[in-house]
Image (spheres, rainbow, N blue to C red):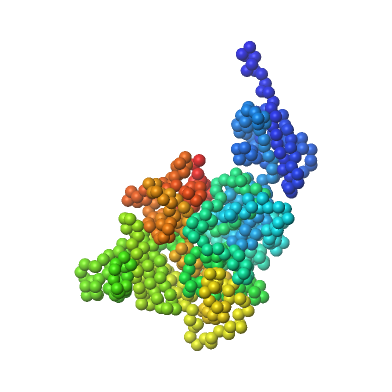
């Protein structure tokens, strides 16, 4: 009897499959009688024969709802996928699959805050989906962008709403781009593919020549103050942390992350390292980056001083004015940016250990700075806050002495700048040129303020501080570039009109000045006063071309102390309270939640290894000198933080000669979870 039993053919069982139509038509349900040795390809064949509707099913694939996974390996059998095992326990008498299109519509809010409807692949991992989105929108370096869920879960609200509620405003760009609706049509014909220069890996022809007028490369007009006021809400560090929690997992598909047809996602520059920005090929990329920077300033997602706000306002006004002037833009005739500009746009953004700094000058001759500066220590009780001393900057340390004569002896005090935070304390109009140093000590950070007399002194000392904080001396070639960057930034901030220039005519500004600054800032000033200040500041930059002005705006945004820091709420191992962790392209900062002050800074350059214990969802990082930190994430899944760290390390491996092909395997290795 036993022998007879094993030879019995496997009994067929019922499998339910829901078939979704392409254009949201009613789905149909089918029951198929199958056995476990049927492979996925055979199952789809069987299903299509049963459906009897003549149509192209090539985009459809099977989705297993219960396990949240696609069944894309067509040669696997049902047994190998483990499908039948579910059928052994009622009440779920049969397994349930969906036969559904892999490409579905998505509402994508671009960095310029406009929403487009686009067809996106729901079955490939998000890293690939973003690559495809960027290819269609013509944004190079797609690895710098990703998709973010809207904070107050817009999608859930939408599902509750009744049918008659006003729909999202959709920006229709597809005709202008000569693309089928939703970006599905023929985008590139063969002649449009970029050919690359084998020497430097750059595209040989300007992309604007293929696309002509591209609405994505034009900046959007500024919103009227009342509309801006509706979007604006002051953000605490905790709010910023919550807004950052929704980054999608790059190594899983949209469908696996519960994203559905017509959900809304935000397309954003995620990693704040913008590699190789070039006006010739990056019209769309530069404009969208400018838009993301502009909104960050207008909605005060990043802090800036009043003086900086005016500078950003005048640049926006200048850009608005140029955009509205009628002559069409021809980016292909933009001159190639010369070396200095190229260095400016790389703005030290290549990560520590990136490629800009390999060219060391003669190591024996490390420059030093020596000057009379003023010092203030907030923790010391003195009546005269700033006191003059003789300062010497050598290697990565600052020492100060009572006087120049005393400098041959022992210093009063010496600061080691490695791992410190450098914060500008500047008001050009009031001739205040200060540098605030947050120096790492065992239990946190010590604050020290240094005052310089003028712009030149400030640029030299601040540049030296920035390099020293990364463990570099002034012998590095990037020191000179850094000094130039600081000087050009100060020049833009100077609100005094150039000598010999007439006072601006207030009626010359046909736009409302309040459109160009954040709502909180515009409340501080009368419109007339604001108009005068923006027009005055604009005279300093009136000669900039449109794309130069956008690049300048991006550079100024990158110069802000808070630039590029993403905040997360975490609980450090052994700690009793939640804290904020800031992650930037080159460092991590532990921040006290109540005061918002940095407690400790750790640099990626000193990181030995990091790993995640997926069971208890704890991230552990080991740095040089046996420093080990461990924390769990409170405001988001630890995968988000893990991916940020891995992503930044991945981006630091890029070089110009890579011909823009990405090492996808390395990206997945560094960011993927080992769950």
Quarter of the image containing the N terminus?
top right
Tally of numbered tags: 0
Residue drawn where x is 68% and y is 52% of the image: 161
Q: Could you tell whether 645 is left or right of 110 in the image?
A: left
Q: Quadrant of residue 448?
A: bottom left
Q: Is residue 499 above or below residue 212?
A: below
Whether residue 113 is visible to the viewer of this picture, yes or no, is yes
Q: Position of residue 182 (x, y in %)?
A: 69, 55
The residue nearer to you, when weighing 299 against 37, is 299
Q: Is residue 153 above or below residue 39?
A: below
Residue lying at the far left in this picture: please name it: 409
Q: Quadrant of residue 522?
A: bottom right
Q: Position of residue 483 (x, y in %)?
A: 41, 71
Residue drawn where x is 72% and y is 29% of the image: 33
Whether residue 360 is visible to the viewer of this picture, yes or no, is no
Q: Position of residue 437 (x, y in %)?
A: 36, 65
The residue nearer to you, when weighing 606 against 528, is 528
Q: Could you tell whether 538 is left or right of 474 in the image?
A: right
Residue drawn where x is 52% and y is 71% of the image: 521
Residue drawn where x is 39% and y is 48% of the image: 576
Residue lying at the far top in this picture: please name it: 1
Q: Is residue 30 above or below residue 162?
A: above
The residue nearer to you, when weighing 548 against 633, is 633
């Amino acid at each position: 009897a036993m022998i007879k039993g094993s030879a019995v053919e496997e009994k067929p069982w019922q499998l339910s499959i829901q078939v979704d139509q392409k254009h949201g038509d009613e789905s149909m349900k089918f029951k198929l009688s199958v056995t476990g040795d049927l492979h996925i390809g055979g199952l789809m064949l069987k299903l299509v024969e049963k459906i009897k509707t003549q149509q192209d099913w090539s985009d459809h694939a099977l989705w297993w709802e219960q396990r949240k996974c696609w069944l894309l390996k067509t040669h696997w059998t049902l047994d190998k996928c483990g499908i039948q095992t579910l059928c052994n326990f009622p009440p779920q008498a049969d397994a349930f699959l969906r036969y559904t299109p892999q490409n579905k519509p998505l509402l994508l809010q671009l960095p310029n805050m406009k929403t487009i409807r686009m067809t996106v692949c729901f079955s490939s991992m998000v890293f690939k989906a973003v690559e495809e989105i960027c290819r269609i929108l013509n944004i190079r370096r797609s690895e710098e962008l990703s998709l973010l869920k809207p904070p107050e879960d817009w999608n859930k609200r939408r599902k509750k709403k009744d049918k008659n509620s006003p729909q999202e405003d959709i920006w229709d760009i597809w005709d202008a781009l000569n693309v089928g609706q939703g970006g599905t049509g023929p985008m590139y014909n063969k002649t449009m593919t970029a050919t690359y220069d084998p020497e430097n890996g750059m595209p040989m022809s300007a992309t604007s020549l293929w696309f002509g007028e591209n609405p994505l490369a034009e900046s959007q007009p500024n919103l009227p103050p009342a509309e801006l006021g509706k979007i604006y809400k002051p953000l605490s560090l905790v709010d910023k942390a919550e807004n950052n929690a929704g980054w999608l997992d790059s190594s899983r598909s949209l469908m696996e992350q519960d994203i559905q047809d017509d959900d809304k996602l935000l397309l954003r520059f995620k990693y704040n390292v913008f590699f190789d920005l070039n006006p010739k090929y990056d019209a769309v990329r530069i404009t969208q980056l400018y838009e993301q920077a502009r909104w960050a300033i207008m909605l005060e997602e990043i802090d800036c001083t009043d003086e900086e706000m005016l500078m950003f306002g005048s640049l926006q006004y200048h850009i608005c004015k140029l955009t509205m002037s009628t002559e069409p833009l021809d980016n292909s005739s933009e001159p190639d940016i010369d070396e200095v500009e190229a260095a400016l746009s790389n703005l030290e953004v290549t990560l520590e250990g990136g490629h800009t700094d390999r060219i060391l000058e003669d190591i024996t001759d490390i420059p030093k700075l020596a000057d009379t500066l003023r010092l203030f220590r907030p923790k010391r009780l003195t009546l005269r806050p700033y006191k003059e001393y003789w300062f010497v900057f050598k290697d990565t340390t600052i020492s100060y002495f009572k006087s120049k004569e005393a400098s041959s002896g022992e210093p009063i005090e010496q600061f080691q700048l490695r791992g410190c935070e450098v914060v500008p304390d500047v008001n050009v109009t009031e001739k205040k040129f200060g540098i605030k140093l947050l120096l790492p000590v065992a239990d946190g950070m010590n604050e020290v303020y240094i005052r310089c007399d003028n712009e030149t002194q400030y640029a030299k000392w601040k540049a030296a501080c920035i390099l020293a904080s990364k463990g570099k001396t002034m012998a590095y070639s990037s020191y000179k570039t850094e000094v130039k960057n600081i000087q050009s930034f100060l020049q833009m901030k100077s609100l005094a009109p150039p000598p010999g220039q007439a006072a601006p005519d207030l009626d010359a500004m046909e736009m409302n000045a309040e459109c160009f600054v954040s709502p909180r800032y515009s409340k501080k000033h009368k419109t007339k006063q604001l108009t005068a200040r923006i027009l005055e500041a604009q005279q300093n930059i009136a000669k900039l071309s449109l794309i130069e002005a956008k690049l300048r705006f991006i550079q100024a945004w990158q110069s802000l102390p808070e630039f590029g820091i993403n905040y997360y709420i975490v609980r450090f191992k052994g700690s009793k309270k939640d804290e904020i962790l800031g992650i930037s392209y080159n460092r991590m900062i532990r921040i006290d939640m109540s005061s918002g002050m940095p407690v400790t800074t750790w640099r990626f350059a000193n990181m030995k290894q990091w790993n995640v214990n997926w069971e208890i969802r704890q991230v552990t990082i080991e740095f040089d000198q046996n420093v080990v930190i461990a924390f769990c994430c409170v405001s988001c899944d630890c995968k988000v933080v893990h991916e940020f760290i891995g992503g930044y390390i991945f981006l630091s491996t890029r070089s110009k000669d890579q011909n823009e092909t990405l090492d996808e395997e390395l990206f997945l290795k560094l960011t993927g979870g080992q769950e």
